[in-house]
Image (spheres, rainbow, N blue to C red):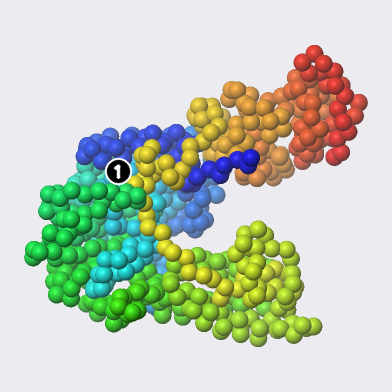
Amino acid sequence: MPNEKKNCVEYLRHAEYYDLLPTFDELYARSSGKEEFKDLMGLILSRQNILLAYRELKANDGSMTPGTDGLRIIDIRKMKEEDVVQKVRKIVKGGKDGYTPRCVRRKDIPKPSGDMRPLGIPCIWDRLIQQCIKQILEPICEAKFSDNSFGFRPNRSAENAIAAEYRMIQRQKLYFVVEFDIKGFFDNVNHSKLIKQLWAMNIHDKALIYTIKRILKAPIQLESGQIIQPTKGTPQGGIISPLLANVVLNELDHWVESQWQKNPVTENYKARTNSGGCPILSHAYRAMRNTNLKEMYIIRYADDFRILCRTRADAEKVKIAVTKWLKERLKLDISPEKTKIVDVRNRYTDFLGFKIKAYKKSKKYVLKSHICDKASIRIEKNLKEQAKLIARPREKKTVADEVKIYNSMVMGIQNYYGIATNISIDCGRIAFRVNKTLKDRLGINPRTGRIKKEGRDLTSIEKERYGNSAQLRYEAKSHEPIYPFGYIRFAKPMNCGRDVCSYSISGRARIHDLLECNTALLHELMRTQVSTDSIELADNRLSLFTAQNGKCAVTGEEFMSVSEIVCHHKHPKKWHGGDRYQNLVLVSDTIHQLIHTYDNAEVKELIKKARLTEVSQFEKLNKLRKKACRKPIDAITKEIVTNGMTKKTKTVTN
C-alpha cells in the first residue's frame, strides 16, 4: 500500500522546525480569551523567532530586491547564526532614540488602469525585523479578525471571497451590491488610529508599540533621491503592511456585521453550525426582517470591499452610512466616481478581476461570471508579447525558457480565473487572437513552420491537464509543449472553512499534519550552535533532517543523537561548494569519515563500524566520495563483518 499523502502548509512546517507552533497556539488562545499582551518583544527577539523570520524572508522573491542600502538576502546568508540574532537585537534596541529604520526606497510601478502604484521597499534588515513582528502579531490578530475578511490572511484567498459573493447572490438573492473604493488607502492610513486599534486588541507592549510607530514613520526616499517624512500611511511592499491594513479595516468589518449578521438580536434565537463551521442564524434573520434593521453583508479583500443588500433603499442608506463612518472613524475618504450601487440583475459588478451578474432563467435568477474587461485586455496583451518572445528570445534566454514563461502565464491565469462560470468562453476568445500571433510569428507550415503536433513527452501533471486537448501544440526547436490557453473548464470556487485555523490543534486538523520524524532530536539540532556554520547552513540542516526522516542518507539508519549528525558538503566549500540545500546531505559521523578518508586500513575499520552490507549503500557512499574527489571504494574484495557474520558484498559499479 502506498503511503498516505500528508497535508502540509509550508509556513506551519517551518514553525515546526523552530518549535514555535506551541507559542503561536498559546498567543491565539490568549487573544481569543481577551487577555492582554505586555511581554511580546521578548518573543519577537527570541533566537527561534529570528531564525524562522530569516527562513520565511529568504523564500520571498522580494528578498533579492535591494533597499536604499543596496543589501539583499545573500548578504545575510553567509553570516553566522548568532551574529544575525545579535544584529537584529542590536538594531531594534538602537541608540539613544531606540529603533531607527533606514530609508524606505520608493518605486512606482504601473497599475493595470494605467496609473502608478507607489511601492515602499525597506532595507533587508528592516524587512527581517518586520517579519519577526508579523510572526508574533498574526496569531493574536487572527483571533480578532472577522470571518468576512479574506485578503492577506492564512487559509483565505480571493477564491474564497468570490465564492462568498456567488453564494450571497445565487442563494441569498442579494442583488444590490455597493461597490466601495477607498482613495489611496495604504497612503492614507492614520497612524494614531492604527496604534489605538492595536491597543484595543490588547497589544499593550509599549516597546512593541514604539517599534511599530518607528516603522510607520520611517523616511521615504523617492526615485529622484528626495527624502520625505511620512505623517500617515503604511508603505505597500512592507512585510507588515498587509497585516496592519487588516487591523485598520477590521473595525469596519465588525461594525457592518453588528448591523445585521451579528446584531445583538441574533443572540435571542437558537443557531446551529454547518459542516464548514459557519453558524446558521436563519431563525433570527427571519424575525429581523420584520424590523427596521438594514440587511447587509460585507465581503472584504484587503482594501477592496463590497456590501450586499436586499433592497435598493437599504443599499442607498448603507452607501451613505459607510462613507460617513470611514471618514469620521478611520479618516479615510471614498472615491465618489468609483463608489456605486449595482443591481446585478441589470448590470455586471466587478470584484477582484471578475465581473458578476444574475440573469433570468425560467422563473429564477442564475449567476454568471466572466473575466472582467480590464483584466481580459491585459491578459491578451501580455500573452501576445510573450508569444513574440518565443519567436525572438531575449538576451540570455533560450526558446525553451520563453516557452516555459508563456506556459507559466497560461497556468497562472487559468488557475486564478478558472472559477468564472464563463471562463471557457473568455479564454476561447482570447486564445483565438493569441494563437494568431503565435502562428504568424512561428509559422504553421508542416515543413518549415515551428508549430508542430509532436514534441517531448508530457509530464504527469501536463498529461492530466492538457493531454486530451486537440489544441495542444509544440515548439519545433525546443520540442516544448505550448499550453492551449483556450482549453479550460469551470471549477467551482471553494468556500473557506470557518473551523480551519492555523493556530489551534483542532483548526489545523484539516490542513496540516505534524512531522512524524524525531521532533525532539530535530529541535535539539535546531538549538545546537556550531560557531563556524552560516545561518543558511543551519537552516538547511533542519530541512534535510525532515526530508531524510531523521536518517543517515547512506545507511538509512535513524540518528540517535545530535553528536553523530554531520552536514556534509557534496562539493567541498574550498571548491566553491556553497551552503545551498542542493549541496548538502546529512550523514553519520562514521560515514562522513568514510567519505573523506584515503587510508585503506581505516576504510575497512570504518565500513565494519558503519555496518555497511548493501550494494546500494556502497553506491551512495561512492557517489559522495566521487563528488569529494576521492576514489570509490572497491567492494569486491572487502569482507564486511556484521553481527559476528562475514559476508561478501556484490560488485558495486561506480
Rendering quarter of residue 398? bottom right
Q: Where does the N terminus fall, quadrant-wise?
A: top right
User: Is residue 646 depicted above or below 300 in this figure?
Assistant: above
User: Is residue 24 depicted above or below 369 in this figure?
Assistant: above
Counting every numbered tag in the picture gives 1
Please state which amino acid type lies under the numbered disc 1.
Answer: Ile
Report whether 268 appears left or right of 185: left
Rendering quarter of residue 94? top left
Report whether 472 appears left or right of 490: right
Q: Position of residue 134 (x, y in %)?
A: 36, 47
Q: Where does the C terminus fall, quadrant-wise?
A: top right
Looking at the image, which residue is at 48% across and 78% down?
426
Looking at the image, which residue is at 37% across and 58% down?
495
Query: Viewer-proximal residue, 34 or 327?
Result: 34
User: Is residue 327 depicted above or below 583 in this figure?
Assistant: below
Q: Position of residue 221 (x, y in %)?
A: 37, 62
Report whether 369 appears left or right of 39: right
- On the question of residue 469 being in view, the answer is yes
Report whether 549 appears left or right of 44: right
User: In the orientation shown, which residue stands out farthest toward the left?
Assistant: 292
Q: Disc 1 on helix, strand or loop?
A: helix
Looking at the image, which residue is at 33% across and 43% down?
139
User: In the orientation shown, which residue stands out farthest toward the top?
Assistant: 644
Give the residue at mark 1: 140
Looking at the image, which residue is at 74% across and 23% down?
610
User: In the orientation shown, which residue stands out farthest toward the right?
Assistant: 637
Q: Where is residue 122 in the image (x, y as percent from the top left)?
A: 40, 55
Callout 1: few (<14), some (14-19), or many (20+) C-alpha neighbours within 10 Å? many
- On the question of residue 50 being in view, the answer is no
Q: Where is residue 620 in the image (x, y as percent from the top left)?
A: 76, 36
